[in-house]
Image (cartoon, rainbow, N blue to C red):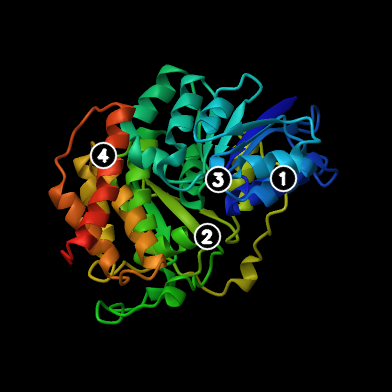
Amino acid sequence: MIRRIAILGSTGSIGKKALRVIEVLNSSLVARGSSLEKEKTEYEIVALSAHSNVELLAEQARRYKPKFVAITNTDYTGSLRELVGDLDVEILAGPDGLTEIAQLDEVDIVLTAVVGAAGLPAVLAAAQKGKTLAIANKEPLVIADELLTATAKENDSTILPVDSEHSAIFQAMQSGSADEVSKIILTASGGPFRESSVEDIQNVTRQQALSHPVWDMGPKITVDSATMMNKALEVIEAHWLFDMPVEKIEVLIHPESIVHSLVEFVDGSVIAQLGAPDMCLPIQYALTYPARVVGIAKHLQLDELGKLTFERPNLETFRVLSLGFEVARTGGTAAVVFNAANEAAVQEFLAGRIKFVNIVELIEHCLNKHNVKRRVSLEELLEADAWARREVIECLKQKVL
């Protein structure tokens, strides 16, 4: 059996890990005795994409020999052609390249790890084609929510979560039916400011915000962890992915990052998924589902863990988390604006043009100014996304904060 895979965002952290996972799955390291032993599955890499990291994309093309490569920043198209011109590979350029890949008949699984809203048209296109969607970034379900889940349902497209928390919930929910779930508990590391007060974070530096105590992630996602915006987005994502009322979703700080999330059932049973803080495991599970096979994820040594601790987040320090619950309840384009304003604000923070605490202030400003629309098209979603980004810049120009 062959599973044909496209990786959107192959040069990023998740993309690189996914390629490592696939290498191991295709190697002799896959142990005998697994559920796939009788008919070993081969994982074929059909397409890869990057935004601007043309050198790494070219290296990946040489190593993994995909049929298609896409570079979404057209400024690098010429460089890519020079670097892979001798290979038997079709080069796609521009944002539409992602959509072309997502619709390929040669692709069974689309693993999307494109930060932000850029990959949304491709995700929807894959759902329309009935592909299996392995979603690593939060934005598709946050931004498109109802549109994406309805499109997937109409076209028998399967959505498999790759981020560690939602993968954990997905795995735990195999223990019962959705109507037997009492609540979902998302765990959070708490980031670098877990024990900080509102006063403590007033003058946070870029370096401090990027110093995550557990996870190795890209700068944007690391800042989201520092503000706990990542958890706010996960609340919205869980609401749509698992069709779960917001009132049944909780967040707990778990600094050890061993319990990736939990599901409580109506009988009082709490099912947790534990694992080392390594994204290789949820990536592999999405690619091999419903089977489990030996891979490269580190195994836990329970006797070495010591203790596992849980605490409630400080909603004054992490004000954006409260906003996330409000946005999840509001629905419609509120989530689009919430996400887009954050992306624009984080970019300004990383560039040194605003303070860390201004991120949530800009998000709240945009939410207060936005008129929420419901049951909207992709075009209207993208319009709301663009409006929020413009509003952040305009707010800074007018020195509203």
- Compute the Cα span from label 3 to label 2: 14 Å
Q: Residues within 10 Å of mark 1 (few under 14, many from 20)?
A: many
SS at mark 3 in the image: loop
Residue holding disc 2: 218
SS at mark 4 in the image: helix
User: Would you identify the image quadrant in which residue 190 lies?
Assistant: bottom left
Residue 51: mark in rendering: 3
Residue holding disc 1: 58
- Compute the Cα span from label 1 to label 3: 12 Å
Q: Earlier in the sequence, mark 4 or mark 2?
A: 2
Q: Earlier in the sequence, mark 1 or mark 3?
A: 3
Q: Earlier in the sequence, mark 2 or mark 1?
A: 1
| The one of 381 and 23 positioned closer to us in this rendering | 381
Q: Position of residue 27 (x, y in %)?
A: 83, 43
Do tag 4 and tag 2 residues touch (Cβ < 8 Å)? no
Q: Residues within 10 Å of mark 2 (few under 14, many from 20)?
A: few
Q: Position of residue 253 (x, y in %)?
A: 39, 66
